[in-house]
Image: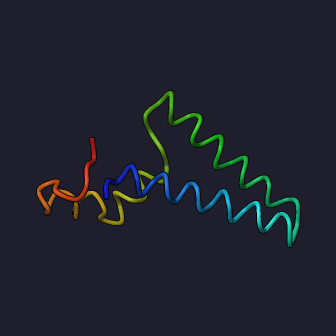
Amino acid sequence: MTIERILRGIAGFFTLLSVLLAHYHSPYWLLFTAFVGLNLFQSAFTDWCPMMALLKKLGIASQCASNGGATCSTK
């Protein structure tokens, strides 16, 4: 699994979670949905994403490097 696929999975999970929270708890959770969408939109232009930086800080990128890139790609 590549780090990009992990990132897309996290973004999808956060989007679905915030929509469910908005439906069952408070519509203000849609602000979190908008935040995720804006981050995805800006990362398309800047090639930088805060979650990617966090994943690298947590060692996801170094795990990929130790595997020789066999299971992860950090492009």
Q: Residue at x 78, y 68 (%)?
A: 21
- Name the residue nearer the viewer: 21 or 32: 21
- Name the residue nearer the viewer: 58 or 69: 69
Q: Residue at x 78, y 52 (%)?
A: 31
Q: Is residue 41 above or below residue 20?
A: above
Figure label count: 0
- Name the residue nearer the viewer: 1 or 58: 1
Quarter of the figure that contains the C terminus: top left
Residue 72, position as x, y percentages in the image? 25, 55
Q: Residue at x 17, y 53 (%)?
A: 69
Residue 44, position as x, y percentages in the image? 50, 32
Position of residue 24 in the picture relative to residue 42 (left or right)? right
Q: Residue at x 80, y 55 (%)?
A: 30
Residue 60, position as x, y percentages in the image? 31, 62
Quarter of the figure that contains the N terminus: bottom left
Tell me which corner region of the image, top left, top right, bottom left or bottom right, holds residue 56.
bottom left
